[in-house]
Image (cartoon, coloured by chain):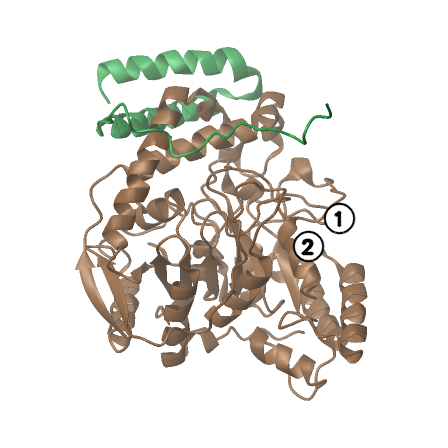
Chain colours: A green, B brown
Amino acid sequence: MTEKSDEQVELLHSIIKARFSKFLTSEDLERVKEDLRSIKESSDAMASVKLRNADEPFFVFKPYKGRKARL
Amino acid sequence: MKQTPLYMPIRQLSKHIRDGEISPVELTEFFLTRLEKLGPTFNAVVTVTRDRALNQARKAERQIKAGRYKGPLHGIPYGVKDLLATRGIPTTWGAAPFRNQVFDYDATAVKKLDEAGGVLCAKLAMIELAGGMGYKQPFASFTGPPKNPWNPNMWTGGSSSGSGAAVCAGLVPFALGTETWGSILSPANNCGVTGLRPTYGRVSRYGAMALCWTLDKIGPLCLTADDCGLVLEAIAGPDPNDPTACSELWRYKHRVKRRFRLGLPKGVADNTHQEIQTCFNQALNVLRQISTVEEFEFPELPYEAVTRTILNAEAASSFDEFTDSGAASQLTAPEDRYGPYARTLVFARDYLKAMRLRGIIARTVDAAMARFDAVVAPSSRRIATPIDQEFRKATEGTTRDIMGAIGNLAGLPSISVPCGFTTSGLPVGIQFMGRAYDENIVISIANVYQSLTDWHKRHPNIPLD
């Protein structure tokens, strides 16, 4: 992890503390930091692959229309 | 009953039922007794569904006597992982906060088994919330750590732990499990049973606990590959309640008579336990009698990072309210109590990048597999680990799981069959992973492999008393 990555993890960790510290012990909070590092590592690994503008997410949105309206 | 139904494959049991040699009610009583007496020994069962089972068995008996035989599952007892909804019976998701949860409907897979004449005997134990909170150890279920019938000091694998243990210990002839990433193949491997992870969408997810909408799959754990085919045919197919379910019915075609072409990912067994490598190499020698085995490489892509990002993002959303309520503090494993929080900060940008990469990976992997009928690999990179240890720490070599990441990310079918035992008597599995929708091919390969070996016929000796 670079210094910049550590900084990002610390920033994210401060959000977790602000939102969830009432549910977590100080030990838990340290472990959450490890999880945040792991999430950052996955993000970095994905960044190693360049995508084209045309590469769309692998799911399809379909507009929905219910039963025919009565005229 | 003239002969014991214990460890009898479904095809054989159903022949005895059809011929009137085994009564569905007697058969159901036989397995209910085993579930009640032995289930607690292995922490394999959450609820024995005795009343529902006997009602269904009596109904099956009446129908069969009246000449209305439905097919190979008619009158056959089974169990389901306790994350499938069952009307009026608790569905706990393996987790203390949900121990009193009761739905007023059956999951589609359960409904389909009901229609096929199956007899639901038990809701089976599982890792809490299907392992979705990031568990690291077997003691992550409110029903206690699932114990391996081959050695109760060792783990069953998870998260479909009770499904693997129950089939292995002869508590039910077959069970349903689910897999998001590894949860069918892992218990199949550790318990020495046959487990099938179907193509994503082959089986409706309606009524199953949602962990990750684009990764969750339901599949059977059985004594044989043939049994997996019979069960899959019953539970597969369209469902208006699940828009991702396949639009067509699936028919099990028993065996394909031709020589198979198997792909062997380069180095797939490297850095695994030495005894896994030994069993795997012996299995490859058997497979060379019925197939070509050609080494190849999957292109270098961040398979695990993409799968993990999707899992984290979707699990964070599916358990959003649970996380915000702080209810995770009631979970059994300490790591599950803090596991849900970090993932609430997966960026939408990363999730969408993962979904964009998923398309590239699905096409790339399919192209790499196109010249093969299936890819062959160890079912797991580990043998059953001690029940009181974190399983990653107790594993020799790498804990990376490229096969699991690729298979689940691309939604590919895979079947795990036992292929040997360690010197300490623990089972080892081999998997055949096919291209999307190629369940008949992977089951056929497993069928032929099981016709040449007897690993699947070995069972732990578990006296009833």
Left or right: residue B39 compared with residue B424:
right
What residue is at 52 percent from the left and 62 percent from the top?
B221
What residue is at 74 percent from the left and 79 percent from the top?
B23
Q: Amino acid at mark 1?
A: Arg
The picture places residue B367, in percent across and down from the top left corner, at 25, 49
Which residue lies under the disc numbered 2?
B111
Numbered tag placed on residue B71 in the rendering? none
Left or right: residue B259 compared with residue B438:
left
Left or right: residue B93 compared with residue B188:
right
Which residue lies under the disc numbered 1?
B87
Q: Secondary structure at mark 1?
A: loop
Query: Is residue B419 something one can see in this rendering?
Result: no
The picture places residue B388, in percent across and down from the top left corner, at 48, 49
What residue is at 46 percent from the left and 73 percent from the top?
B254
Can you say which quadrant of the picture contains the C terminus of chain B?
bottom right
Query: Is residue B157 something one can see in this rendering?
Result: yes
Q: In the depicted view, which residue is nearer to us: B135 or B73?
A: B73
The picture places residue B286, in percent across and down from the top left corner, at 28, 76
The picture places residue B152, in percent across and down from the top left corner, at 52, 61
Chain bearing mark 2: B
Chain bearing mark 1: B
